[in-house]
Image (spheres, rainbow, N blue to C red):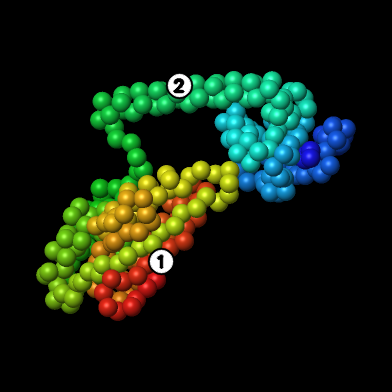
């Protein structure tokens, strides 16, 4: 069965030319949408792929109606091949169900692999050059050294609690713990001179974290997990009992139950925000490891 897909980039454009060509090619069902090729998620393309069955062929007027880049095109064709489906482009006369079309596709794949290798080599060379000049990569810190100095000064005042210091700095207590050298120990040392804050405690919790891509065309969950581990969870003495699982053990510092709730909610918010930046979403549950039956 031939399934057609037509796309125009703006609301002012009309797909009539594409629809005529797809109908002439014998497409039994056609999916049409108005969306820029820069959009990661295209609902009608997703609907077409869901509608198709093994043995069907997706037909487009031109390849640029389907993908914005060679990599995206190859990913789409690989997805179709994995489902035992074909792709036909009327303008480029490409049909992956024929031997000639398969040859063209493999040539495209070789060119894409060559492009990735060149980019990888240039990136590695650039990083090595930057390290030689004393520059470090990675995500920039939210706080400057001046911010950290100001926070330390607030914590040295016996009349200012951790929550008050964080509020004055415009952050959550978890962020304050993260950017002060020494983490919890620096905060606890500042609180030793304040009898009112002598009830500093810690709680071990289990975090069950699941990360998924927003749709089938996104592949960001592995990198999202790495960022969440490096920039969110590592500040809480993160332990990972099983290498390839989504289970973590964290040590959460707190003085009051309210502060404990705020810190855990901040961890979950930052994890969700980090995943969202790579077009992913999270499902998470936090359970206290003491006998209190608390969970978030």
Residue 170 visible in the shown view: no
Q: Is residue 162 above or below residue 209?
A: below
Q: Quadrant of the C terminus?
A: bottom left
Q: Which residue is mark 2?
A: 118
Q: How many residues crowd around disc 2 within 10 Å: few (fewer than 14), some, or many (20 or more)?
A: few
Please tell me the numbered disc located at residue 285: 1
Apparent side of residue 241 relative to residue 185 in the rendered image (left or right):
right
Residue 139 visible in the shown view: yes
Q: Is residue 190 above or below residue 78?
A: below
Apparent side of residue 86 relative to residue 126 in the rendered image (left or right):
right
- The x and y percentages for residue 262 are 36, 69
Q: Residue at 73% x, 30% y: name it.
A: 88
Apparent side of residue 233 relative to residue 89 in the rendered image (left or right):
left
Q: How many residues crowd around disc 1 within 10 Å: few (fewer than 14), some, or many (20 or more)?
A: few
Q: Is residue 114 above or below residue 36?
A: above
- The x and y percentages for residue 285 are 41, 66
| Mark 1 → mark 2, Cα distance in angstroms | 42 Å
What SS does tag 1 mark?
Answer: strand
- If you read the primary sequence from the N terminus, does the residue marked by circle 1 or circle 2 appear first? 2
The front one of 191 and 224 is 224
Q: How many numbered marks appear?
A: 2
The front one of 161 and 247 is 247
Q: Residue at 54% x, 22% y: name it.
A: 110
What SS does tag 2 mark?
Answer: helix
Residue, far bottom: 292
Q: Quadrant of the N terminus?
A: top right
- The x and y percentages for residue 205 are 30, 67
Quarter location, residue 29: top right
Quarter location, residue 287: bottom left
């Amino acid at each position: 069965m031939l399934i057609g897909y037509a796309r125009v980039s703006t609301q002012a454009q009309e797909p009539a030319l594409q629809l005529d060509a797809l109908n002439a090619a014998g497409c039994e069902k056609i999916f049409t949408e108005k969306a820029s090729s820069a959009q990661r998620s295209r609902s009608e393309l997703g609907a077409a792929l869901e509608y198709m069955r093994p043995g069907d062929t997706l037909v487009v007027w031109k390849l640029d109606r389907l993908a914005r880049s060679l990599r995206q095109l190859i990913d789409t064709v690989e997805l179709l091949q994995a489902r035992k489906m074909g792709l036909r482009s009327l303008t480029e006369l490409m049909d992956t169900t024929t031997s000639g079309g398969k040859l063209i596709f493999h040539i495209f794949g070789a060119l894409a692999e060559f492009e990735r290798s060149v980019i990888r080599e240039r990136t590695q060379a650039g990083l090595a050059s930057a390290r030689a000049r004393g520059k470090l990569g990675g995500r920039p810190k939210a706080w400057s050294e001046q911010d950290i100095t100001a926070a330390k000064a607030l914590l040295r005042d016996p009349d200012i609690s951790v929550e008050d210091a964080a509020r004055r700095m415009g952050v959550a207590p978890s962020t304050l713990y993260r950017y002060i050298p020494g983490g919890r120990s620096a905060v606890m040392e500042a609180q030793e001179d304040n009898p009112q804050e002598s009830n500093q405690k810690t709680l071990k919790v289990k975090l069950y974290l699941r990360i998924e891509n927003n749709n089938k065309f996104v592949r960001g969950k592995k990198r999202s997990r790495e960022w969440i581990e490096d920039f969110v969870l590592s500040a809480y003495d993160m332990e990972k009992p099983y290498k390839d699982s989504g289970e973590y053990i964290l040590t959460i510092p707190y003085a009051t139950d309210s502060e404990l709730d705020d810190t855990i909610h901040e961890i979950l918010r930052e994890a969700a925000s980090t995943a969202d930046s790579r077009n992913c979403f999270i499902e998470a549950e936090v359970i206290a490891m003491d006998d209190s039956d608390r969970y978030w």
